Amino acid sequence: MKKRTLVTILSLGLLTISSAFAKEKIDFMFPAPVDGKLTMEMTRIIKEFNQSQNDVEVRGIFTGDYDTTKMKAEAAAKAGQPPALAIMSANYTVDLALKDAILPMDDLFKYSKDSVSATDFLVNNFWPAMHKNAQLMGKTYAIPFHNSTPMLYYNKQLFEQAGIKQPPQNWQELIDVAKKLTDKSKGQWGIMLPSTNNDYGGWILSSLVHANGGWFNNPDYPGEVYYNSPTTKGALQLWQDLVYKHEVMPAGVLNSKQISANFFSGKLGMAFLSTGALGFMRENTKSFDLEVAMLPEKERRGVIIGGASLVSFKGIDESQKKAAYQFLTYLVSPEVNGSWSRFTGYFAPRMAAYDLPEMKTYLDNDPRAKVALEQLKYAYPWYATYETVSVRKAIEDQLAELVNNKKYTVDEAVQNAQQKADEIMLPYQNATSLKTDK
């Protein structure tokens, strides 16, 4: 009897000890396919975090592209299994906050040992160009993780063969250079722009609109876009003219894989792609020198911030919030954020990452990585609206029609896009009275 009692006591004691040291398990959603180098690198980061401490165990869930990640995270939340942390396209923050789907970051930052608020952490540690896409009405709902701007990638060998001394600085030079680089007898194109409706087309288009001196949307009111403005028309007309008037870009919707394949084969002179593609482009360009430059200007320099932020979905308990805070601050630490930047080509939104010796060495060894940072002084917030995805696709679908149909006019495109976008945003417009002109 005494032996049984002793065994029971020891068992209970072991259970108590085991319970005391059990890790809090949280789900972390990451926008990447289940295979590939980004997934492998993030898997390594998660493993190192899990092994570095005894409080939290992170389970990585790799979810596909940004749009798919948003859908899967929202579905998991509705099913009662919200991710404690997710890397979400930075321009989804406003829509998710409007839907009351994500937590204000202060719900996590209350576990900060030095009682710093999420807004103070954001403002004091991240590039100013990132702040707008992390907030709604002054409240912080996201913390930047990796960011990008579109850049001009070009084949230095083709430039030299065509006698081109420098990358184009404005739209007219872009057209002139693209003409010199185009040789249809060789299947060689002067330029390619991604026009898919998975955010690439809208992202590049919005940068062109800003370079044309306009605004793509109202950054202070999530219910207003300017698809039928003269500056948007001008950007769309340039895009269609590159295909049908100047014949320097193939017709049809182009995705980033098609563009990069043409570039690697030496059959493409220039491309507009994300700085987040720099690692991939750098690694796969073998037979010629790859160079990058700022996007050409029209009325001004102007690019749109892209990339992703960390958000936390509503429905997690306090222990999960504490665990999410611990993993979040690990991911955006200068060391991890800098390492991820060097691996991927995204620039690190955490400013202190660039103070590290390894980051300085990286930039010295590859000055191409500096271009995205140099463009920050000309960067504008990513478009973020009520029902961002649907509103964005309203213009991307029209862009697709313009590059597929020579007879389709820009006037038709912007009228249809504006009408569709306004219909989608009408519930929000009716519910608010903050609409202003830009």
Image (cartoon, grey):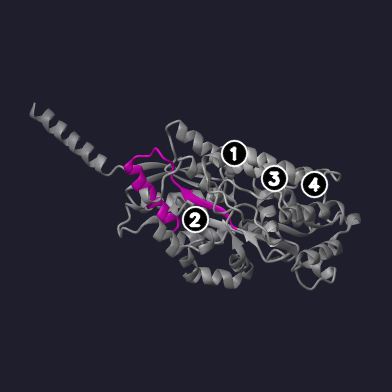
Of badges 3 and 4, the one in the foreground is 3
* Other residues around mark 3 within 10 Å, as few (<14) / some (14–19) / many (≥20): many
The Cα atoms of the two marked residues, 3 and 1, are separated by 16 Å
Horizontal side of residue 14 vs 353, given as left or right: left
Mark 2 = which residue?
144
Foreground mark, 3 or 1, reads 1
Type of the residue with mark 1: Leu
Region in magenta: 305-332
The residue tagged 4 is 403
Dot 4: element: helix
Q: Amino acid at mark 2?
A: Pro
Label 1 belongs to which residue?
A: 426
Q: CA distance from mark 4 to mark 2?
A: 34 Å
Q: Is residue 313 magenta?
A: yes
Q: Earlier in the sequence, mark 3 or mark 4?
A: 3
Q: Are marks 1 and 2 in contact (CB under 8 Å)?
A: no
Residue 305 position by quadrant: bottom right
Q: Is residue 82 left or right of residue 317?
A: right
Looking at the picture, tell me which residue is in the foreground, 308 or 47: 308
Q: Residue at x 50, y 68 (%)?
A: 354
Label 3 vs 2, first from the N-terminus:
2
Q: CA distance from mark 3 to mark 2?
A: 26 Å
Q: In the rendered image of this protein, does residue 414 appear above or below residue 80?
A: below
What residue is shown with label 3? 395
Which of pointers 4 and 2 lies earlier in the amino acid sequence?
A: 2
Residue 226, position in %: x, y?
A: 66, 50
For marks 4 and 2, give the one nearer the viewer: 4
